Amino acid sequence: MLAIYCLIVCFLNVNVVDSQGSRRLMSRAVNTKYGSIRGISIKFPNRNIKPVEAYLGIPYASPPVGSLRFMPPINPSQWRGVRVTDRFGPVCPQRYPDIRNESESLRQMPTGRLDYLKKIIPYLINESEDCLYLNVYCPGKIFCYISCCFAS
């Protein structure tokens, strides 16, 4: 259930990183159960949108490949050093409509759906069965401690 919630949060926050904000690697590392991570700070040009800390592509389970395919997720391996979490992890393989021909697409779906697909499809290009990653966003002025304990 938590994994589904995290996926929803991930998709709802696609616009956050997509905005024309400035991104910079943070100087401090955050400790997790599996190792340390260093995220990015994102500042937006709009004064009304506060800066955020983003930790992108944090593994929350071992890759579901080989003998782990179609099995419940297991804990990820611990890592040494600091893992830079500044990029989205791959998405799980999926099928989405071909929208290259806009007029044909508009016959098959509402304009709002087409606009939404145009926005998210660039994020769906990097597909892999190794797709169990989280994107965590924290308010920029608050220390964010992440304790990864999603798989039992």
Image (cartoon, rainbow, N blue to C red):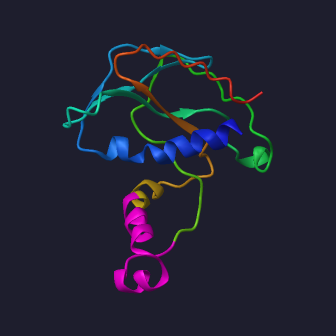
Left or right, 130 with reference to 43: right
Q: Nearer the viewer, residue 52 or 127?
A: 52
Left or right, 5 with reference to 121: right
Q: Which residues are magenta?
A: 97-119
Residue 101 falls within the magenta-colored stretch: yes
User: Is residue 20 depicted above or below 60 in this figure?
Assistant: below
Query: Can you give x and y, in whole percent of width and height, for residue 63 in the image?
Result: 66, 41
Query: Can you give x and y, in whole percent of width and height, for residue 13 in the image?
Result: 44, 43
User: Is residue 145 depicted above or below 111 in this figure?
Assistant: above
User: Is residue 14 depicted above or below 32 in this figure?
Assistant: below
Left or right, 96 with reference to 16: right
Q: Residue 133: which quarter of the image?
A: top right
Residue 123 falls within the magenta-colored stretch: no
User: Is residue 54 depicted above or below 115 in this figure?
Assistant: above
Location of the N terminus (image quadrant): top right
Q: Count the labels in the image.
A: 0
Q: Main secondary structure of the magenta part?
A: helix
Left or right, 142 with reference to 133: left
Please report the residue visible at 41 percent of the width from the left and 86 percent of the height from the top.
104
Query: Can you give x and y, in whole percent of width and height, for residue 25 in the image?
Result: 31, 25
Query: Can you give x and y, in whole percent of width and height, for residue 128 in the image?
Result: 57, 52
Please report the residue visible at 45 percent of the width from the left and 42 percent of the height from the top.
88
Q: Nearer the viewer, residue 60 or 97?
A: 97
Please report the residue visible at 49 percent of the width from the left and 48 percent of the height from the top.
11
Please report the residue visible at 37 percent of the width from the left and 59 percent of the height from the top.
119
Q: Nearer the viewer, residue 24 or 64?
A: 24
Location of the C terminus (image quadrant): top right
Q: Nearer the viewer, residue 120 or 91?
A: 120
